[in-house]
Image (cartoon, coloured by chain):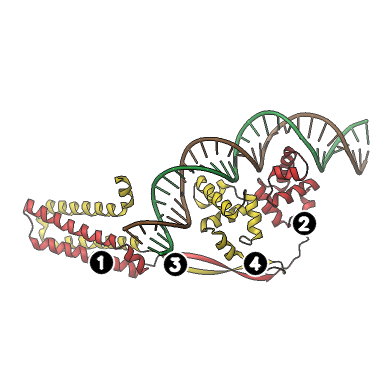
Chain colours: A yellow, B red, C brown, D green
Amino acid sequence: MDFKLISRHKHIILYGICLAVLLFLLKWLELRFIILSHAFEIYAGAIAFVFTGMGIWLALKLTTPKVKTIVVEKEVYLAQTEVFQQNDSEIARLGLSGRELEVLQLIAEGLSNQQIAERLFLSLNTIKTHSSRLFEKMEVKSRTQAIEQGKRLHIIA
Amino acid sequence: MDFKLISRHKHIILYGICLAVLLFLLKWLELRFIILSHAFEIYAGAIAFVFTGMGIWLALKLTTPKVKTIVVEKEVYLAQTEVFQQNDSEIARLGLSGRELEVLQLIAEGLSNQQIAERLFLSLNTIKTHSSRLFEKMEVKSRTQAIEQGKRLHIIA
DNA sequence: GTAAAAATCACCCAAAAGTATGAAGCCGGT
DNA sequence: ACCGGCTTCATACTTTTGGGTGATTTTTAC
């Protein structure tokens, strides 16, 4: 519908509105201070200033963030018999997403859904959705089973 | 990243259109009020265009690039200093009884209270009582916290 | 540009978990 | 015999969890 179209391109529309408002503002100023036509340099400077800002805004809005990978060495104590490195392949096999993994981690730390929601600045419902998908993918029925399974498959510490 | 920019060229095109509309409006206003010379509008438009580009260039060139940081934890394996035998003293300190310990064990295995009751041939209510006392003694509020605490204190595997 | 995946949030409902309180039987120690 | 701790169970109640469904938005991929 029209609403969807509007919401989808709200950035563009917003930008267009800004341009229009700016234009009329400039025109109004021009009409008001017609006497100051000799102060053309100031006017041009203002335009330059404003549009430079607009360009900056545009650039910041349109660029996608660069991905920077930081490798952090994490000290892990473990039993001599088994080595802890299985996780990545298992995570990929189960098709766990980043958020799901994050939620699993916090579940294993003993947090309730409400606490997880607060920690991640999300709504309770969102956490429920994530945990539901998590249980589906891990083929378990409860958070405690998820913990057990997660530790067994070495996808959490 | 270039790919992403190309995929969003529509924004830039729309921006161009906005500029054109802007100029058109200026022209219209000029015809309406017959105040300014053509040279000024063209000049202003050019300034706006050029400085928008400059703003983009500035933003891309001089700002610290937006960085999406992905932290990859690389495990560094260390020899385990202590062997798993701590449990007894901690159990004594917390004053956990046999049944409570048993229930904790089964909770950590991911069993529900109902399943634990069936496993131990007890009623669901009894398991609830045990788990409640367990949580009290361990100073936790949920089974997941009990698992976390239990593993941390080495009272369960 | 479109399609898929991921992430977000909402509402409803049922099951499980957890709290509070009371009570009964057992067992070891004084 | 009495006390205290352990175990067992019950009832009633509140909170949390989990399932199902649907929607929107953002991101990613092709």
State the residue position of label 1. B53
Q: Secondary structure at mark 1?
A: helix
State the residue position of label 4. A84
The chain identifier of the residue carrying mark 1 reads B
Toward which corner of the image does residue C26 lie, by quadrant?
top right
Q: Is residue A98 above or below residue D16?
A: below
Separation (CA) of disc 3 from disc 1: 25 Å
State the residue position of label 3. A67
Q: Amino acid at mark 3?
A: Val
Confirm whether circles 3 and 1 share one chain.
Answer: no
Q: Are marks 3 and 2 in contact (CB under 8 Å)?
A: no
Q: Secondary structure at mark 3?
A: strand
Confirm whether circles 2 and 4 share one chain.
Answer: no
Q: Are marks 3 and 1 in contact (CB under 8 Å)?
A: no
State the residue position of label 2. B87
Q: Earlier in the sequence, mark 3 or mark 4?
A: 3
